Structures are given as C-alpha cells and as structure tokens.
C-alpha cells in the first residue's frame, strides 16, 4: 500500500518489521480539533495544503499534512512511530503488501469496510474497482489478515509505454500510430535512430522495479496470468521455456542497438529528463510522468500507449492500481474525523482539484472529462490492470532482487537469459527449503 511503484521500493526495511511495529507504549491522548497526516509526496504538498484550508473552512477541523522526504526516511519514521504507538491520525505505507499486513495484525490500521459499505456501498462504489482492489485483503488471503478494505486510494497509477510524437514525425513515422507489437516497437525505434540519430529507448533500469514491472507484463502476455502466478507459488520453474523467452526479450532489445547508453544503471529521474529533452523516442514510465514532463519541457509532444505485445494467445495486463493510499490509525482518538476527511478528499470535487494540480489519474470514477488530453485514453485499460498487491501471493523479495539484477546483467551483456533463469530458480529453491 502507499505509493506502489512496485517491488523493491520499500524492501529495505522489511527486516525491521518484527521488532518495529508491535510496541506497547500507550496511545497518545486526544489532541485539539485537528487531524495530522504524514506523507512523502513532495509534488503534492502545495495542493494538499490548499485542500486542508478548504476543509477547515467548511468543517472547522484543522488538517495538517506533514511531509517527510525522501521515501526511505519517511518509511523509517513510520516504523519508529508504530513501535512507539505515536503514528499520526492518517498515514501511508510504502512497500510490499506483507508490510501493510504486519501493521494490520499489530492493530495499527483501521478496517475501512464498514465505512465504505455504509449507505448501500455508496463510497465504495465511487472508486475505480481495479484501483480500490489494491487496498483490499480478500477472504483466506496469504497473509492471514482479516478480510477487508484497509486503505483509501487517492489516485491511480498505470505503467505504460510513452513515445515522442515530434520525433516520430521527423523520422517519417505516423504520430497517431504507435507500435502494437514488440517487432513494430523495435522497427520504429531503429528507424528513429537511423534517420535522426536519437536513441530508440530510454528507461530508468538502474531501478530494478521498472525492469520487474515490464518483465511481468510480458510474462503474463506470453504465458498467461495463471502460469505466471503458478511460478510464484513454486509450481512452475523459472527455467521453463516461456520464462527463457521473457528474459530473451531483453536480450533482443540489447542486440537491436536501440537502448540508450548506460540504461542498466540509469535512474528514473535521469530517464525522465532525457525523454523530456527529446533525447529518445520511447520510454516506459508511470502516468505520474505527465507532471514531471510538464515541469521539464512544457512543449513536449508525446503520448502513452500499451505494452507492445509478444503474443496473441493471452490478453495484455498492464501494471497499475492505486498509486498512493492513506490508512487511518486504528488507535487514533480522531479516527472518525480522519475517516470523514478521507471521504471528503476522495469526493469528485477534490479529485478534480488534484487532477488539475498534480496531473495524476483519479482514484474514483466519473472524472474522465477533466483529465489532461494525454491521459484520457488510459482510462480505457483500467479493466486490464494488474499489480502484486492484487495477486494471491507475492514473489519472495530475494528472488525479485535476483530477477532484477539478472535482467540488468542481460542488458549489459554479462549473462545470457539461460544463465539468469538458472540463477533465479536456484535462489527460489534455496529459499523454499528454509
């Protein structure tokens, strides 16, 4: 839960959880008529502050958004506060779903189901189902958490491919016809590089989660979601021929000559900067990039498009869901006021305000007309979203690290897809024997 830019983003503090979140210090006493919210979203602090003032004017309840950055520092602060029972009224959790599960089991997160399902599910039904799904623990879930809704999403994030329309035109390509298959993608990227000397593809692959997300999308398209999930359960080996094919797609990208120099160690910020400055025709990024690109190059002419497919046998699944979510502190004396504020925050008027100020996709339905033009078509794929937080079980974090490192090594030409597959499976089997 929280900002789920995906496996790896919050794993640094997983080992601290057992000792960190089950403290026994007494809860804080009721404070003034005020709600305190902790978050990590630098780009939204100004918008949040404006909304806080509006809410205080309407209700008389003061709302304080406290920003802690960078995300690593924020996560450490949340863990320390959980240990001391000094969490704020509202907060978010960064990282894997098992982290949120640990907080829930320790009694730190309020089950929002009764509030969401009041008045004939009115609040619950206002959300995009695939967005809300990320914050739900289902019956008999892998983590042993009581079923329920434990977070309130405030936006939706989708990882999509993005292309530079201006560079398309310069290379003689149709700017209204982005590639639909991997073959077309490589062909178009080569054409741009050969005709105008610009890199075909740039991405922050120094951050493993972006590689992992893309590998997941291609794996599900190639082998189907059922076989993909069986791999996580240990019923299918990573040395299976379909997985070798998935890893080979990255080898093919390397051999095609379209990748930007140093892509395997590049950060996402560096990638966003390069794409914004017309240094590459294609990239792979989240919908939050709209705000980033606007800040770097307001005149950038670009568009999003779905994963270039590698098979017609199975449907495309696009990585996405709740981008950022807030949880209510179950021990807070202000929890009812906190719930009321989150209901107000996710109402249409406030969601439209956030669209205008932050250019993020909304968490709720009925806001399509207010989206920036570049994002309007992305709502069409909401029904195809997938994310680790909606899977029955997540892959072990150590296995994910080996996958991500292996993909980087393939891109750098250090290892073959077969070698990487064997290393991943060896790690998987070793962990399973524990």
Image (cartoon, rainbow, N blue to C red):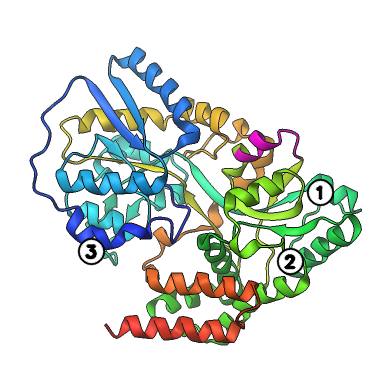
Q: Which residues are magenta?
A: 292-300
Q: Residue at x 33, y 48 (%)?
A: 75
Q: Please tell me whether residue 286 is drawn above or below residue 155 in the rendered image.
A: below
Q: Are marks 2 and 3 in contact (CB under 8 Å)?
A: no
Q: Which residue is mark 1?
A: 176
Residue 204: x %, y % from top left: 60, 57
| Magenta run includes residue 297 | yes
Residue 266 coordinates in the image, percent (x, y): 61, 58
Using the rendered image of the protein, determine whether residue 334 is visible from the camera's viewpoint. Answer: yes
Point out the image quarter for the C terminus.
bottom left
Q: Which mark is residue 181?
A: 2
Describe the element under mark 1 as helix, strand or loop. Answer: loop
Magenta span contains residue 181: no
Which sits earlier in the primary sequence, circle 1 or circle 3?
Answer: 3
The residues bearing labels 2 and 1 have C-alpha atoms spaced at a distance of 15 Å
Task: Pinpoint residue 174: horizontal percent, then vertical percent.
Answer: 86, 52
- Decide if residue 96 is on the left or right side of residue 60: right
């Amino acid at each position: 839960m929280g900002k789920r830019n995906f496996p790896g983003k919050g794993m640094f503090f997983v080992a601290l959880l057992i000792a960190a979140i089950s403290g026994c210090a007494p809860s804080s006493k009721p404070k003034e008529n005020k709600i305190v919210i902790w978050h990590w979203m630098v780009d939204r602090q100004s918008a949040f502050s404006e909304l806080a003032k509006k809410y205080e004017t309407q209700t008389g309840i003061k709302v304080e958004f406290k920003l802690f950055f960078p995300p690593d520092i924020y996560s450490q602060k949340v863990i320390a506060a959980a240990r001391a029972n000094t969490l704020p009224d509202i907060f978010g959790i960064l990282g894997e779903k098992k982290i949120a599960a640990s907080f829930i089991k320790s009694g730190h997160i309020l089950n929002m189901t009764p509030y969401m399902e009041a008045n004939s599910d009115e609040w619950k039904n206002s959300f995009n189902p695939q967005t809300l799904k990320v914050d739900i623990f289902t019956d008999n879930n892998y983590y042993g958490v009581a079923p329920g809704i434990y977070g309130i999403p405030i936006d939706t994030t989708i990882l999509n491919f993005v292309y530079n329309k201006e560079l398309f035109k310069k290379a003689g390509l149709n700017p209204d016809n982005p590639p639909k298959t991997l073959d077309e993608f490589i062909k178009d990227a080569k054409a741009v590089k050969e005709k105008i000397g610009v890199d075909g593809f740039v991405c922050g692959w120094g951050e493993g989660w972006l590689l992992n997300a893309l590998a997941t999308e291609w794996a599900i398209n190639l082998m189907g979601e059922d076989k993909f999930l069986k791999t996580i359960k240990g019923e299918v080996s990573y040395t299976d021929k379909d997985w070798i094919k998935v890893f080979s797609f990255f080898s093919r990208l390397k051999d095609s000559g379209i990748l930007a120099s140093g892509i395997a160690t590049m950060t996402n910020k560096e990638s966003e900067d390069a794409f914004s400055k017309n240094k590459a025709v294609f990239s792979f990024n989240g919908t939050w990039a709209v705000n980033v690109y606007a800040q770097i190059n307001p005149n950038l002419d670009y568009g999003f498009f779905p994963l270039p497919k590698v098979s017609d046998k199975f449907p495309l699944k696009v990585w996405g869901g709740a981008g950022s979510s807030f949880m209510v502190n179950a021990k807070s004396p202000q929890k009812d006021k906190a719930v009321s504020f989150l209901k107000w925050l996710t109402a249409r008027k406030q969601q439209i305000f956030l669209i205008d100020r932050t250019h993020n996709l909304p968490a709720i339905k009925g806001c399509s007309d207010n989206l920036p033009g570049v994002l309007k078509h992305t709502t069409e794929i909401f029904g195809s979203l997938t994310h680790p937080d909606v899977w029955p079980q997540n892959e072990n974090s150590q296995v994910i690290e080996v996958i991500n490192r292996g993909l980087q090594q393939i891109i750098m030409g250090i290892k073959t897809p077969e070698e990487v597959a064997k290393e991943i499976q060896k790690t998987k089997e070793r962990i399973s024997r524990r």
